[in-house]
Image (cartoon, grey):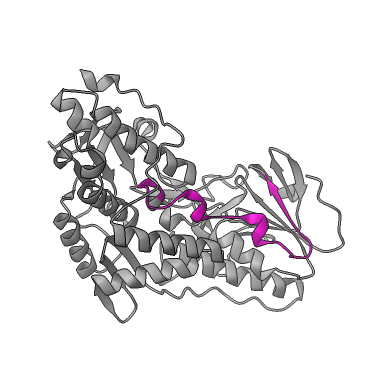
Amino acid sequence: MNIPKTSFPRIVIIGGGFAGISIAKGLKNKEVQVVLLDKHNYHTFQPLLYQVSTGGLEPDSIAYPIRKVIKGYTNFFFRLANVEEIRTEENTIVTNIGALEYDYLVIATGSETNYYGNREIEINSMAMKTIPQSLNLRSLILENFEQALLTDQYHERDALMNFVIVGGGPTGVELAGALAEIKKGILPKDYPDLDTRRVQIHIIQSGDRILKEMSEKASQKAEDFLEGLGVQIWKNTRVTGYDGKTVTTDTDVNFETATLVWAAGVKGVEIKGLNAKDLLVGGSRIPVDEFNKVKGHSNIFAVGDVACMQTEDAPKGHPMMAQPALQQGRNLGENLVRLLENKPLEPFVYKDKGSMATIGRNKAVVDMKNIRFQGVFAWFVWMFVHLFFLIGFRNRMVVFVNWVYNYVRFDREARLIIRPFNRNYSAFKD
């Protein structure tokens, strides 16, 4: 890796997500050598990936170069690498660009889509956890409408304009709302020779309500917003398969669609060497103590989505969301400095700042500790919070200008097929 030797302790951070970047900022200009590794050279603001998928934003507005984050940090090094194995007995990690020894290791690999072992769904559905996946989904959505123009068969056209989203969490709800607004305001203008009234958007939720992590009032209001936009919600329904054409469920309702978006769950990203079955807990997460130290290891830590800190208030670990990752990263950055100074560590205490979801123009739901509200004000709060947590002044300005333009013109300029997905549509001609 060509990392210089040093007399300072070497801290290796795997992952440049919310947690990894937060730790890096806490170690800025301290008497340590920090090596940050990631398979991408940018940090992704994942809460806005659905806007890339639906043409509301270009990907560079929610991505930020990792090297720019650590610019000017003393004794900091970034390497574009994929970590393949952790050799705990040797205090070494093995990557696709070589091996590296560490004094302290921080695992902040984040999460990936959880298909719960259903290989057929994994192969044929669309995920939305990374920028490349979001660009693939954007291309597929637009290609479906282009393909719908080329057929005079109603069943084929309906399947191409039928969108099924599995999972009624914030990702599924926000994506469904964005697609509904596209159907209402953009498709009739872009495709005047296509009966876009036949576009259908479905959310399939295995539980008895959407946004189950939020209050019942927020859940019901979000459902009302979605149904007002024409989204069909199927509750207490579990998807059992998707062959690329037909979505099967555990009920008597099936769907013919060219697009199944899987937003039904996530799991921690495993790394060989720390993925033993006796170590990982539910969702492929690594159990940690109140200091984010991996159980059974004195110099290995895990933070963010991949870490499971089981407490009395959170028996299943903290939510796999941005806020716990940011707070754990900040706490661990400070604790690593305390550790090197032989000071006692501070246990992590999660401060729940609430949760929110937007359903579309002037429609959002917000749950805070002592207050809950919905509608226009909630929508403005949602926008402000997301702008605040974006990294980089340029990104904030670009996203803000895009949102203002989209609001005034009721338009989404980024509906471009830059990298074709090239789906095989032959099955729909049967």
| Residue 138, image x, y percentages | 38, 41
Q: Which residues are magenta?
A: 52-80
Compare residues 93 and 144 and report the one nearer the observer. Answer: 144
Instruction: Give the residue at x 63% y 42%.
Output: 82
Is residue 253 at least partly visible in the picture?
yes
Please, which residue is most extreme toward the bottom here?
Answer: 370
Left or right, 239 with respect to 99, comes to left
Based on the picture, tell me whether residue 324 belongs to the magenta stretch: no
Instruction: Give the residue at x 59% y 66%.
Output: 22
Looking at the rendered image, the quarter that the N terminus falls into is top right
| Residue 134, image x, y percentages | 42, 44
Place residue 34 in its image quadrant. Answer: bottom right
Q: How many marks?
A: 0
Compare residues 194 and 169 and report the one nearer the observer. Answer: 194
Left or right, 256 with respect to 281, comes to left
Looking at the rendered image, the quarter that the C terminus falls into is top left
Left or right, 329 with respect to 90, comes to left
| 70 versus 184 height, above or below | below
Based on the picture, tell me whether residue 77 belongs to the magenta stretch: yes
Place residue 242 in its image quadrant. Answer: top left
Is residue 234 at least partly visible in the picture?
no
| Residue 114, image x, y percentages | 40, 44
Instruction: Give the residue at x 55% y 66%.
Output: 393
Compare residues 322 and 119 and report the one nearer the observer. Answer: 322
| 213 versus 160 height, above or below | below
